[in-house]
Image (tube, rainbow, N blue to C red):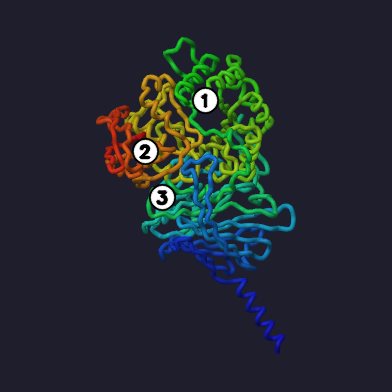
Amino acid sequence: MKKIVSFLLLAFWQVCLYAGNYEVLSPNGKLKVTLSVSDVLGMEVFYDGQLLFSASNMGLCLQQTSFKPLVRSVKRSSANETITPVVPLKFASVLNHYNAIRLNLKGNLAVEFRAYDDGMAYRFVTNGKGKKVFVYDETVDFNLPEEAVLHLQQPVTFKTPYEEPYSHVALKEWKETSKFALLPLLVDTRKGVKLLFSESDLHDYPCMFLKARAGRGVSALFPRYPLETKPISDRSINVVREADYLAETQAKRTYPWRYVVVVREDGDLVENTFTCRLATQTTMEDTSWIRPGQVSWEWWHHTSPYYVDFVVGRNQETYQYYIDFASSCHIPYVLFDEGWAKSTTNPYESVDALDIHALIAYGKKKNVGVLLWLPWTTVEKNFDLFKEYEKWGVAGVKIDFMDHSDQWMVNYYERVAQEAAKHHLLVNFHGSFKPAGLEYMYPNVLSYEGVLGMEQGEFCTPANSLYHPFMRNAVGPMDYTPGSMLSMQPEYFVRHYPNNASVGTRAYQMALYVAFESGFQMVADNPTFYLKEKECTDFMTSVPVTWDETRVLAASLGEYLVVAKRKGEQWFIGGITAEEGKEIEVSLDILHPNRSYEMTLFKDGLNAGLQALDYKKEVKAVSESETLKVKMVRNGGFAAVFK
């Protein structure tokens, strides 16, 4: 009889472990993640009792068979800590407060879930016995509200620089035959809540994409490991043969966090810090040499200053002029883009008209660091250049045209970041995927492009760019390259190099320095233009690139944003809007009480809706008890500083 009872208890215990429901609540109790384990792993996410979305078919396939979750044990934990980022793009300190649950599964596998007050995240963990493991697939089907609208970028293939314009698609209209989407993806549930999907702590693994699925959901999609590639230019490759697996990786490791930011207010998307909270933080002992800052950039306007007494071009006099300009405007860096080197495949010899060593030395005398542009293929073939550039005194590198996001390329980013850090070089990735946490592990990575930015001319409209703070910039630094001094409304837009132009008003361009985040913030236009209009230039070059505090004062997705940012005792406010224009009124209660401030305000002129160059400057005393009223014209904006 005792043996029979023991057997029944054991069977009952196995059933309880192998299948069941679990839940984890956010610290404030409003967000709940409910997990179900049966033949598959699934979850439901609730906020204030409302089901926001669910997920099914969640799995990590380490063999060419379907994933079967069998729970062996459960562990709960919580954290309430403060992270101090080396490069604080939003906040000098970031609160990391969550409750967590870990399901330890059969097969040396686990899955972890975290519930935050403003969202949730999950990841897989493997603890294999060997050294290596093959990941054949990672699966998840997200089930969204039927009436949801998706804001997304849709590349044609996995070979993408993440520069597609945003599409705005009803969930029911996104078909399995439609183009897939990259991250981040923003979901308007049409129930008063928005969901931002992205990932963090991405290492030794491909980027996640999403595809439409029959019904009302989206599913995970990944580029497979590239077995064979073919060069198609001095800077680009095509993958011609793929493996049947996503990754060959360490048997004992954590996998990337998949996170969902949950907000009721659009401005909370802008303020979110999920990528930071979930990333591996740096173990670098000395980060004092990492100095974020603005960059004078010659490529956008074809290296064409005028009113000078030398012939401009890629020569010593011109680049020395850029260094002088940067120094006079307290811009800490100049970027020598494509054309500085004798060949795009030779990173060690400058064109005959340049003495690169003399220019670097001259920059140091002027307290201006030199950054050098390179194609990624050239870096890969000359990985000792980091050591050599440190000897030269180069401040950093801009590495371009990766355009892939498979496991091999993700590892390339990390190899670059690590080697550059070893030799005290800063990094700006162009032709890149979106940030996913590497910049916290290696804070010398100051920015990524991965955005439809100002390089794209008439395609870079405020109507598209108004989504950046809520989506692309919401997940990490963004090298949009603002600073255009030739501003035009879209119906009048024309550009003829060397006189490049932008869509939007002058005040809109000035506001971008406050609204957009980047550890390297370009000052993209012609120094001659800047010197001719010094009051605008003085404001733009005074805007910090790192901040102690970020506060959104007013926001509506894709329509307008008013954001205040503090550095020390100074506050800056930037406002941007799109096609409809916006008259805003915001409280100045962000300011310190019982103190008078001098506000310098740049706003759209009365005629900026027609002549986008029109702006007005005002200087007046204000206090925290007052409100700020500003009218932004279509594609307009405003910028202010409080001293």
Between 250 and 65, the one nearer to me in the picture: 250
The disc placed on residue 268 is 3
Q: Look at the image and tell me whether residue 232 can be seen.
A: no
Which residue, given by chain and number where applicable, does mark 2 sit on?
Answer: 573
* Upstream in sequence: badge 1 or badge 2: 1
Q: Quadrant of residue 240?
A: top right
Characterize the local packing of mark 3: few (<14), some (14-19) or many (20 or more) Cα atoms within 10 angstroms.
some
Q: Is residue 147 above or below residue 83?
A: below
Locate residue 256, reporting x and y percent: 59, 51
Residue type at mark 3: give it: Asp
Q: Residue at x 52, y 37 (%)?
A: 447
Disc nearest the viewer among 1 and 2: 2
Q: Which residue is outermost to the top?
A: 309
* Upstream in sequence: badge 1 or badge 3: 3
Count up the numbered dots: 3
Which residue, given by chain and number where applicable, does mark 1 sit on?
Answer: 334
Estimate the spatial distance between the alpha carbons at disc 2 and disc 3, rounded to whole Å. Answer: 17 Å
Locate residue 318, reporting x and y percent: 51, 16
* Upstream in sequence: badge 2 or badge 3: 3
Q: Which residue is outermost to the bottom?
A: 1
Q: Residue at x 29, y 34 (%)?
A: 621
Disc nearest the viewer among 2 and 3: 2
Q: Which type of secondary structure does the marked residue at label 3 adopt?
A: helix
The disc placed on residue 141 is none
Residue type at mark 1: give it: Val
Estimate the spatial distance between the alpha carbons at disc 1 and disc 3, rounded to whole Å. Answer: 34 Å
Q: Look at the image and tell me whether residue 14 can be seen.
A: yes
In the rendered image, which quarter contains the C terminus?
A: top left
Residue type at mark 2: give it: Ile
Q: Which type of secondary structure does the marked residue at label 2 adopt?
A: strand
